[in-house]
Image (cartoon, rainbow, N blue to C red):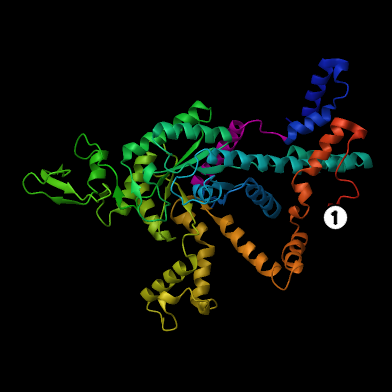
Amino acid sequence: MTYFEEIHRQTGIKHRHGADWQGIDPEFAARLRTQNRFQTGLDIARHTARVMRADMDAYDKNPAQYTQSLGCWHGFIGQQKMISIKKHFGTTKGRYLYLSGWMVAALRSEFGPLPDQSMHEKTSVPALIEELYTFLRQADARELGVLFCDLDKAREAGDEAAAARAQQAIDNHETHVVPIIADIDAGFGNAEATYLLARKMIEAGACALQIENQVSDEKQCGHQDGKVTVPHEDFLQKIRAIRYAFLELGVPEGVIVARTDSLGAGLTKQIAFSREPGDLGDQYNRFLDCEVVEGIGQKGDVLMNRDGLLMRPKRLPSNLFQFRPGTGEDRCVLDCITALQNGADMLWIETEKPHIEQIAGMVDRIREVVPNAKLVYNNSPSFNWTLNFRQQVYDAWAEEGRDLSLYEREQLMSQHYDDSELAIEADEKIRTFQRDAAKRAGIFHHLITLPTYHTAALSTDNLARRYFGEEGMLGYVKQVQREEIRQGIACVKHQNMAGSDIGDDHKEAFAGEAALKAGGENNTMNQFAA
């Protein structure tokens, strides 16, 4: 429905109520409706699911059409990302938001900062989804408010061409509301707990949920040690639970991202149930590190029959069972194929380093069974990108027989090498990593989990050093405010960004000439008009 069609609709509503509604302006009602396109979180989930599905189809046709996101821990952060993306690139297409469980634990828990081990309140995840979309919808309202002002000014000036352009801009407005890939960790309990939390997250607006195959009560960050995985059937129960939540809430296009932590997980809590040799439980159990038992074993042993031999799985004092070393990639491949064959839409393989061929080697094997397998990949700040890629170039040069006498492999992080030929080549590989991995390794979506955690720390450190040092107020003005003005950062007018101009529009509609507006000539934000 166009803007003027909405005005016509609101006019009809007003006329049906006669003189009782004489103080109601149909056009302002139309503006409110236009500024609030999404009435509920489920409206958002349905819209963004369709967006994401269309992007997935486009990627299948052309891997250059990969997507990206940055992790968020506050609604304002997500809002500013999308405003910046529209400012610099003109469209939000292919750019999402990522909701990191790590950042929820570290920054949003009532317990204070926590490690990424599912100890935070599970309700904090849907609460953050709702907060993110509240800020994104406010960004829509703010941007449309500017367009309404343009339309009013054009009308007042009698400029029909400008009015037509403003109307077209309103009708073609692109929303800041984009897909959020939300981290549900390992489901925060059993399959029923996963289903209940998934419902809350979808109702808040999430169209894509990422779940991992770790044990809920032993969950670790993907880049920590001590990870414990569950048998496939346990994980598939949770995938089915999430799908039922999507179906119940009328979002059949909802996306499930199945994450495997098996590459770095050497432990399991359970021996899988198996009905017959070769079934999924038997395949899982064959990865267990076992030793042949003579006789009937010892008291307290857990024993299993493998190919006619009595075997004792190695069990730790923690009561966890150990996998055979070197089986991580094989377990990842089986995890991924199984998840895709049982309702998951995409994969997430958590790795210990950003190495395209390592990822591609597993994806090639997965695609032998599921040809259109796609990945979400964590471009993690837990990786030392500089050192990893310099070492990758070093190793490649060594294979080529090139002279490496100027370099020490273990010291390549040193600033001494920053301008070297090796470092320049490594930086180019970092720059093209996402593009190259999308083409070679089936990665549809690249994300950075914790970017704003690190940027907030870095910028705060720089500001504190300058402001509390000899620069004083110049430390803020020169490095922050002056740059905001010169780079056109909308937040330099922080009152406007917080919604004061939207509030003025409302006051004028509600009170007419009696409105006490904040945006008059004495508002200090006018100092930034230039």
Q: Does the magenta stretch include residue 60?
A: yes
Residue placed under numbered mark 1 in the picture: 529
The residue sitting at 86% across, 45% down in the picture is: 519
The magenta span reads 36-61
The residue sitting at 55% across, 47% down in the picture is: 98
Classify residue 35 as left or right of residue 253. Answer: right
SS state under label 1: loop
Most distant residue in the left direction: 295
**In-front residue for pair 422/162:** 422
Return the x and y of residue 283 as percentages of the image width and height. 25, 43
Position of 506 relative to 423 (above/below)? above
* Position of the C terminus by quadrant: bottom right
- Among the 4 quarters of the image, the one containing residue 451: bottom right
Most distant residue in the bottom direction: 405
**In-front residue for pair 518/368:** 518
The residue sitting at 85% across, 30% down in the picture is: 510
Amino acid beneath label 1: Ala
Return the x and y of residue 437 as percentages of the image width and height. 47, 57
**In-front residue for pair 426/452:** 452
Q: Does the magenta stretch include residue 199?
A: no
- Among the 4 quarters of the image, the one containing residue 235: top left
User: Is any atom of residue 9 visible in this view?
Assistant: yes
Position of 240 relative to 268 (above/below)? above
Return the x and y of residue 265 as percentages of the image width and height. 34, 52
Return the x and y of residue 368 as percentages of the image width and height. 34, 47
Q: Is the magenta stretch mostly helix, strand or loop?
A: helix
* Position of the N terminus by quadrant: top right
Count residues near mark 1 (Cα–Cα under 10 Å), then give few for <14, some for 14-19, many for 20+. few
User: Is any atom of residue 369 visible in this view?
Assistant: no
Position of 437 relative to 56 (above/below)? below
Classify residue 116 as left or right of residue 458. Answer: left
